[in-house]
Amino acid sequence: MEAAGLPAVTQHHLIRLRDIYNYWLKFPLTKDRDLVAYIQQVYELQPTQAYADLRLVKALLGDLQKSTKEYHRYRFIEMVSAAYEMARINRDAKSMVAAADKYAKYTQLDKEDLVDRGFDKIMIQPFKPTDDPSVAGFKPVPNIREKIQKKIASYWNEEIEEVEFETVEFNEDEIFKPKADEADEAD
């Protein structure tokens, strides 16, 4: 990281995030508050920074406590395979059949494969914008454009004029930051 020119603060932060993730991998069932306590204890950080680091680890690498359905499917197949292998080693035909049955039901080998219905071949209907409300099922208002022009004209008069935008130059520090002597006078 030094060769890449990464600042020392960033290097320490990355090492801390790696350590948090490795600790979490070692103890995956650890609650968030326990992880935060670990981070605070080891790195002497405030709770807000510890929670921020934990949130960053979860965002980058995922939450270990939220297992996906795909993971559980994988685990189920692994368990059934292990049960089948154990039954085969013990020469237990009844258990082998039971494991094979569970595997077949879970993977739905008894059902036909899905037929491609060709939804990807459906052509999208062209969209043509219109200002005709009858297309949506509403009654059109007769002479609507003239009514709109009359309403605009009723609010328009000779006194209204369009103006150009002018840039104003000012010093923000003078306006938004009080001077030291003004702050003393206020006290």
Image: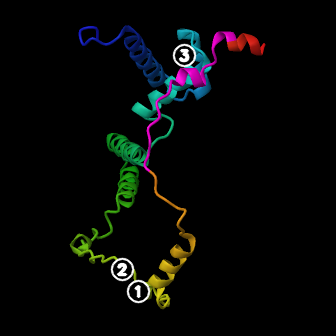
| Pointer 3 residue | 39
Local packing at callout 3 (Cα closer than 10 Å; few below 14, some 14-19, many 20+) is many
Q: Residue 38 at x, y = what percent?
A: 57, 16
First in sequence, mark 2 or 3: give its number: 3
Residue 146 in the magenta stretch? The answer is: no
Measure the C-alpha gap from mark 1 to mark 3.
62 Å
Q: Secondary structure at mark 3?
A: helix
Local packing at callout 1 (Cα closer than 10 Å; few below 14, some 14-19, many 20+) is few
Q: Residue 186 at x, y = what percent?
A: 76, 16
Answer above or below: position of 146 versus 17: below
Residue 187 in view of the camera: yes
Q: Amino acid at mark 3?
A: Ile
Q: Secondary structure at mark 2?
A: loop
Comparing 138 with 154, the one in front is 154
Comparing 103 with 6, the one in front is 6
Span colored in magenta: 164-181
Task: Single out the mark in the foreground, 1 or 2.
Answer: 2
Circle number at residue 130: 2
Q: Residue 169 at x, y = what percent?
A: 46, 30
Q: Write the residue at 60% across / 16% down.
A: 46
What secondary structure do most residues of the magenta stretch adopt?
loop
Local packing at callout 2 (Cα closer than 10 Å; few below 14, some 14-19, many 20+) is few
Answer above or below: position of 32 versus 84: above
Q: Residue 112 at x, y = what percent?
A: 29, 70
| Pointer 1 residue | 135
Q: Amino acid at mark 2?
A: Thr
Q: Amino acid at mark 1?
A: Val
Comparing 99 with 58, the one in front is 58
Q: Are marks 1 and 2 in contact (CB under 8 Å)?
A: yes
